[in-house]
Image (tube, helix red, strand yellow):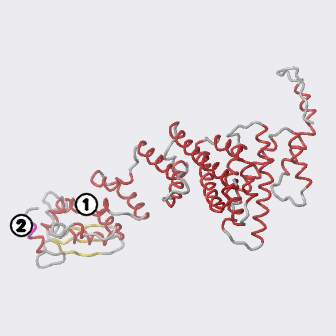
Amino acid sequence: MDDSSNKAGSCCQVGDRSTSDVVVRLRTKDGRDEWLYCHSHILTEQSKYFADRLSEKWPTCQILDSRNCVEVFCLESTFDYHVNLLRLLYVITDIPTDDLWNDVRTVLGILRVAFDLECKNIISACVNYLEAVPWEEDEEEEILKVIPHMGSEVEPILARLQPVNSSLIRQIFLSALRVATLSPFSNINDLKPSAQEQLEYMLVEDDDAPLLMADAEIKLEVNECVKSLLKTFNSLLEIVLDPVHSDGKERNMQVLVFCLTDLAWMCRILKRLETMKELVSNWIDASNKIVKVVEQASVASEIIDTRVGIVEVLAKVLEAIKHGSVILPTSKRLHMVKVWLPFVRTTKSLIDSLANNGADDPKLKIDSDVWELLESAFVSIILALPSGEQAEIITEWLQNQHVIRYPDLTEAFEVWCYRSKVAKRRLSLVGDNPGTTGTSFQPSA
């Protein structure tokens, strides 16, 4: 716009009938009708739409008064934005654009009108504002509905929402992984929960595909972090069990609980990456020490906190064994049942007792799904053992039914009874199968 136009614009105002030479008539289908007295030189300079409407090339330009009145039909929801835009046409060249706006929703509404009326300067000012300011979640959703249909002029607004390349995602993931597995003694531990939550979110498949598909390099890096966590965990077990360190036992027990929390989270990550083997193997080897730590705990809060942390990790370990994600020999599976079945039984009883006595500690509220998972895992693992070992475990359970309520091994009992009853008949038929060798099968004693 040249200087003369700027000067003329600054002397004119919307609604000044004494200098107006054109009326913009805003109308809605609901009957709202407002006449705004404007100035053609402002409208044509700032809006291609009005420039076309007021030109001699417009089909109705020769009709009496057609060039003195421009009708604009709009929705009721955009009526006020149309009025605001007409006022802005008069000041857009005089006032810094930073001073024109005060909220995202209003600017977005004006941008929609400016796009329809082809107001280049207004569009540019709106884009600059929306690209620079933060958005609330509902504003972001509205922007995603409106902006993509407006073409290249508004693309800068969407820059923050564009997908990034995979190398940047990997960098974020690996950096967050290191934060998520920091030592309990780190001075930025307040960032760990957020890092852990977002890492899990990046790997989960919900309405959208996972943000990151883990390859060999990612799995290797995760396994290195697992080794570091397990090294810390094993060292803590040794320290807590060593009488030499008895003076700092309470603090070491607290750190152990933090470490268990990290391991429980890591189990969820490893489950998604299908790489639970190392953690499961370490847990099996350390099982006796872990139980011994709890048995030696003297402070009630230590006992509860530690037991709850152990249960959370144990559920994931047993789930991996149950589903065959980690293949173990019979001796180790039997060891897991013999060590952890009594532990889980005692822990459930203790927590239920405290809850029934009115204790309102959030730590006592282990998700019912965890208990159900543990029970289901024990049943599956027991039923995968040789029938003789199954019989010993079920016998012990039946002999103590007056005090044992959890875990319920009824399903294992029923399956064992069926298998045992039909064992000789079923195995004798194997020799009659044309596809088998002559080797005879003998059921376990």
Please say whether residue 398 is one of the residues in the magenta stretch. Answer: no
How many angstroms separate mark 2 from mark 1 (CA)?
A: 23 Å
Answer above or below: position of 377 versus 27. above
Task: Please tell me whether mark 2 sits on a helix, a strand or a loop.
Answer: helix
Q: First in sequence: mark 2 or mark 1?
A: 2
255 is higher (above) or lower (below) than 274: below
Image spot of residue 381 (x, y percent): 78, 44
Q: Is residue 7 left or right of residue 361?
A: left
Classed neighbour count for the residue bearing mark 2: other residues with Cα under 10 Å, few (<14), some (14–19), many (≥20): few
Whole-percent x and y of residue 149?
34, 54
* Residue appearing at x 78%, y 55% in the figure: 343
Question: Dot 1: within a 10 Å radius of its alpha carbon, few (fewer than 14), some, or many (20 or more) residues?
Answer: many
Q: Which disc, if any, is residue 123?
A: 1
Res 128 → quadrant: bottom left
| Rendered location of residue 326, percent (x, y) | 68, 39
Q: Hey, what amino acid is under mark 1?
A: Ile
Q: Which residue is mark 2?
A: 4
Q: Residue furthest left?
A: 4
Q: Which element type, helix, strand or loop, lies under badge 1?
A: helix
**Which residue is at the front of the view, 282 or 361?**
282
Vertical position of residue 8 compared to residue 240: above or below? below
What is the chief secondary structure element of the magenta stretch?
helix
Q: Residue at x 91, y 49 (%)?
A: 395
In the picture provided, is 23 more to the left or to the right than 238?
left
The front one of 28 and 201 is 201
Amino acid on which the number 2 mark rests in the picture = Ser
Q: Quick check: marks 2 and 1 in contact, CB under 8 Å?
A: no
Part of the protein shown in magenta: 3-7
